[in-house]
Image: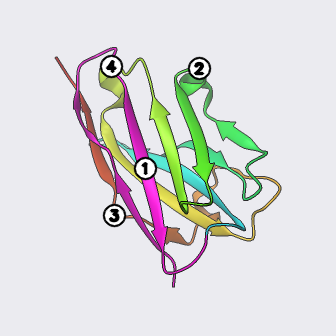
Amino acid sequence: QLHLVESGGGLVQPGGSLTLSCAASGSTLDYSAVGWFRQAPGKDREGVSCISGSGKAIVTVDSMKGRFIISRDDARNTVYLQMNSLEPEDTAIYYCAAARGLFELCDLSSGRYKTWGQGTQVTVSS
């Protein structure tokens, strides 16, 4: 059974950077798309970025393009989210999730993702 664990969150100043990791165990991520989602206090969960199982398709929300970069290392069974130029509005709990069988494409429809991690807190504040 696939199990996901996020790490790398923390407190960072505005303009700073963090790299989140989503490590999988129990099964391989090879044929799964992986998405990053976030939920800020008092707000609905929103999609951030996803990467297809092949690694060739990436979707990133417009407001985060150029700042957030998703990547995957199948040898390590891990997906990363590099976050640059962080803003206070990026403060949220960040979750990764896997959608098995989504190999060529990905999207940020959360219903496609059946396995979720427990989340990691990112706080952007001076």
Q: Is 48 placed left or right of 43 in the picture?
A: right
Residue tagged 1: 21
- At a point 41% along the width and 17% down the height, the residue shown is 85
Q: Which of marks 1 and 3 is in front?
A: 1
Distance between the alpha carbons at the discs numbered 2 and 3: 26 Å
| N-terminal-most mark, 4 or 2 | 4
- Three-letter code, disc 2: Gly
- Three-letter code, disc 4: Gly
Residue 118: give its label.
3
Residue 71: give its label.
none
| N-terminal-most mark, 1 or 3 | 1
- At a point 62% along the width and 59% down the height, the residue shown is 74
Residue 24 place in picture, x, y as percent: 48, 67
Residue 73 place in picture, x, y as percent: 60, 52
Residue tagged 2: 66
Distance between the alpha carbons at the discs numbered 4 and 3: 24 Å
- At a point 59% along the width and 20% down the height, the residue shown is 66
Distance between the alpha carbons at the discs numbered 1 and 3: 12 Å
Residue 33 place in picture, x, y as percent: 67, 59
Q: Is 103 placed left or right of 5 in the picture?
A: right
Q: Nearer the viewer, mark 4 or mark 3?
A: 4
Residue 17 place in picture, x, y as percent: 36, 25
Name the element at disc 2: loop
Distance between the alpha carbons at the discs numbered 4 and 2: 14 Å
In this view, the residue farthest toward the bottom is: 1
Closest to the observer: 5 or 38? 5
Q: Nearer the viewer, mark 1 or mark 2?
A: 1
The magenta span reads 1-28
